[in-house]
Amino acid sequence: MWGGATQTPQVSYDRNPMGIVHSLFARLVTALVTVLGAAIVTAGLLSYGDPAVARVVPEPTVSLPPIVIASPTNGAPGASPTLGPGASAGPTSQPGKGVATRVVIPALQIDLPVVSPPSGYPLCNVAMWFADPHLGQPGQGRSTYLFAHARTGMFGPIYDAVIIRRAPKSLLGLIVQVYTSDNKLYLYEITKVLPHQTSLDAAFNAKTEELWLQTSEGPAGTVGKTQVLAMPLSVGDADPAEAHPVAKPVVCG
């Protein structure tokens, strides 16, 4: 008892050999469950349910352009998503001070606002940037990692080229435009298309400016994602109106 005299705990020994066996078996099962649980968490890095997301981690504290939440469309069920702060980021004169706000691939007719990911299921009608200490934003000399669902109006054209038409080389040389909240326009050229990926190591280990795009390869549970690598070409000033599109994300069904 607390504050009282110390008492020697009473230990009961099971003289039944089968009782000892059952006790050891129970401990073994508990250990196995613990190990398997850790393995499942690790394996989930690139296996988030539906198309297009590696994992969702807490977003860094940055200011984002205003976000307008629209009602679900095209039959997508669900309530309006919960997003982070929506204060405008002030323009600066130096690149690398803003976050991605828009991604455009003219040849594929892809043009999406970019927002920070929600704490739950990835959104539709927008692309999202992946928040991780290993990654950065355009102009920061590291990988910028953007992902979106493999659906019409999103990164569906990438899925179509790589998975449906089996023509990943058709994407090589295409120009990707990324606008940022500090009114900059970054141009990249697609140099690699990597289907069936299960790791973010290449993006995490980048030592120079790179852009990575990710989308899924099938319905929920499909293992592997398509990653597109684009290398930087130039950076210049952008029209603020073009750099700050009004995002209308919806909850995907």
Image (cartoon, rainbow, N blue to C red):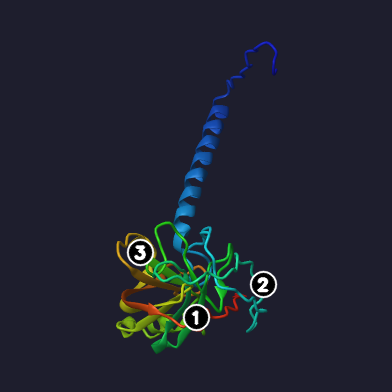
Q: How many marks?
A: 3
User: Residue at point 47% right, 65% down?
Assistant: 130
Whole-angstrom CA distance, mark 3 to mark 2, is: 33 Å
Of labels 1 and 3, earlier in sequence is: 3
- Viewer-proximal residue, 214 or 190? 190
* Callout in the foreground (1, 3): 1
Question: Where residue 28 appears, x then y in whole percent?
Answer: 50, 37
Whole-angstrom CA distance, mark 1 to mark 2, is: 27 Å
- Viewer-proximal residue, 242 or 148? 242
Question: For the residue marked with disc 3, what is the amino acid?
Answer: Arg
**Could you tell me if the residues under marks 1 and 2 are in contact, i.e. CB atoms within 8 Å?**
no
User: Residue at point 61% right, 18% down?
Assistant: 11
Q: Secondary structure at mark 3?
A: loop
- Viewer-proximal residue, 93 or 140? 93
Q: Secondary structure at mark 1?
A: helix
Of labels 1 and 2, earlier in sequence is: 2
Question: Where residue 206 appears, x then y in whole percent?
Answer: 32, 62
Which quarter of the figure is the C terminus placed in? bottom right
Question: Where residue 165 appears, x then y in whole percent?
Answer: 38, 86
* Callout in the foreground (3, 2): 3
Whole-angstrom CA distance, mark 1 to mark 3, is: 24 Å
Q: Which mark is residue 80?
A: 2
Q: Which mark is residue 240?
A: 1
Q: Name the residue that disc number 3 marks.
A: 142
User: Residue at point 33% right, 63% down?
Assistant: 202
Residue 82, can we see it?
yes
In the rendered image, the residue lying farthest to the top is: 5
Question: For the residue marked with disc 1, what is the amino acid?
Answer: Pro
